[in-house]
């Protein structure tokens, strides 16, 4: 999968969205931050752990801004750049916005990597931005102990098309647009037990832009959207449940998984971030009695450049699902529903 002498993943202590701080740690860090109330134009800040910040310019325009970067999840420089860029752009799409330009964030261990490797990372990220129809208009670089790459992305949305993670409604159906298991695959890759078919499947999933989010946001029956990344399905589902004041009920049998995810999880290819995620959820998650640890790990698995979790009117869910599938997301599934009740996620 790479002919590099030095594996990119060997230079990093973690990779992809598995590098994120655990949800509980992030909550503790943000707990002392000042409230954003004085800024009337700041429609979305840190209050619900949403995917991007939103600033209203006028009655018809909002700026949507995000930043996302991490250490390598693969060794191929171009693939790493593509994955990181796709992941960063996802935050804009998850808010119902459309990106307009990006700035590169680059940290590289000078002297440990050849310039052509670093150039490959940048080229990979730029290629994804080109696919999204935007330029990489600048950026910043530093000499760092570990390789880091990502983007700051600026987008636009209309106030009426803005979608948050905290606006699900009772009775909504829940749709997940990509298969779960990226963290498991990345663990298998680092252990050098992921075969070529698995690697290709992982790259195809993690470089698939979540641009359907901007389309979904134009539908008034789509009430809430978030992307499923480093906190796993349970973590991002719990953010939606808490923000919306609802219980999310998810069917384990309905969940889509990457083809080898279950087998690799059973074989022990589970990330440390998966365990940290589980320890952070507290009493907000209810699992079936006797659920095997490896199955639980798939629910807490950090998803680098994962899919969208969509909450929509139940009577239109099948129609909306067909539209998502036809837009290029063959793994999309209806996975459960939102119900009145305590803010938590229940797996059945």
Image (cartoon, rainbow, N blue to C red):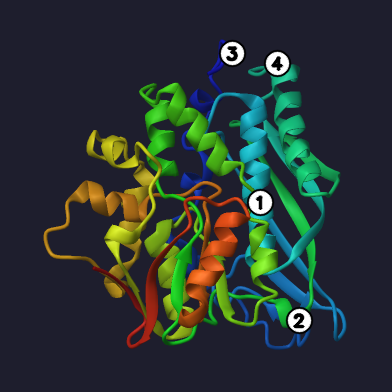
Closer to the camera, 289 or 65?
289
Residue 299 x %, y % = 33, 55
At 60% from the left edge and 75% from the top edge, which residue is drawn? 164
The residue singled out by tag 3 in the image is: 4
Q: Which residue is mark 4?
A: 114
Q: Residue at the far left: name it.
A: 290
Quadrant that contains the C terminus = bottom left
Is residue 68 shown to the viewer in this render? no
User: Residue 88, which numbered label?
Assistant: 1
Q: Which mark is residue 159?
A: 2
Q: Nearer the viewer, mark 1 or mark 4?
A: 1
Q: Where is residue 78, by image quadrant?
A: top right
Viewer-side label of 4, 2: 2
Helix, strand or loop at mark 3: loop
Badge 2 density bin: few <14, some 14–19, many ≥20, Cα 10 Å = many
**Cα distance in 3D space between marks 1 and 2:** 21 Å
Which circle, 3 or 4, is nearer the viewer?
A: 3
Q: Secondary structure at mark 2?
A: helix
Tell me which label, 1 or 2, sits earlier in the chain. 1
Q: Residue 298 at what x, y percent from top left?
A: 32, 50
Q: Which mark is residue 193?
A: none
Note whether 69 is above or below 98 in the view shown. Answer: above
Query: In the image shown, does 30 or 325 lie closer to the viewer?
Result: 325
- Can the viewer see residue 204 in this picture? yes
């Amino acid at each position: 999968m790479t002919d590099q002498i030095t594996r990119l993943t060997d230079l990093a202590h973690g990779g992809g969205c598995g590098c994120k701080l655990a949800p509980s740690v992030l909550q503790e860090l943000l707990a002392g931050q000042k409230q954003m109330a004085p800024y009337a134009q700041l429609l979305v800040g840190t209050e619900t752990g949403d995917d991007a910040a939103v600033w209203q310019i006028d009655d018809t325009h909002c700026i949507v801004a995000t930043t996302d970067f991490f250490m390598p999840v693969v060794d191929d420089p171009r693939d790493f750049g593509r994955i990181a860029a796709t992941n960063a752009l996802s935050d804009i799409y998850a808010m119902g916005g459309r990106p307009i330009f990006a700035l590169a964030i680059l940290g590289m261990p000078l002297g440990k990597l050849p310039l052509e490797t670093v150039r490959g990372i940048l080229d990979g990220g730029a290629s994804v931005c080109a696919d999204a129809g935007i330029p990489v208009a600048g950026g910043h670089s530093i000499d760092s102990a570990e390789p880091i790459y990502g983007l700051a992305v600026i987008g636009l949305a209309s106030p009426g098309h803005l979608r948050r993670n905290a606006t699900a409604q009772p009775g909504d159906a829940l749709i997940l647009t990509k298969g779960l298991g990226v963290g498991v695959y990345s663990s298998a890759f680092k252990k050098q037990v992921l075969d070529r078919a698995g690697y290709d499947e992982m790259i195809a999933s993690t470089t698939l832009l979540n641009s359907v989010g901007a389309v979904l946001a134009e539908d008034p029956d789509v009430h809430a959207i978030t992307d499923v990344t480093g906190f796993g399905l349970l973590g991002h589902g719990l953010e939606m449940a808490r923000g919306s004041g609802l219980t999310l009920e998810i069917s384990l049998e309905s969940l889509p998984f990457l083809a080898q995810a279950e087998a690799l999880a059973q074989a022990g290819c589970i990330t440390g971030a998966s365990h940290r995620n589980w320890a952070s959820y507290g009493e907000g998650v209810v699992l079936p009695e006797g659920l095997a640890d490896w199955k639980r790990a798939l629910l807490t698995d950090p998803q680098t450049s994962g899919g969208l979790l969509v909450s929509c009117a139940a009577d239109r869910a099948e129609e909306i699902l067909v539209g998502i599938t036809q837009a290029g997301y063959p793994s999309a599934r209806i996975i459960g529903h939102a119900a009145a009740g305590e803010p938590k996620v229940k797996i059945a």
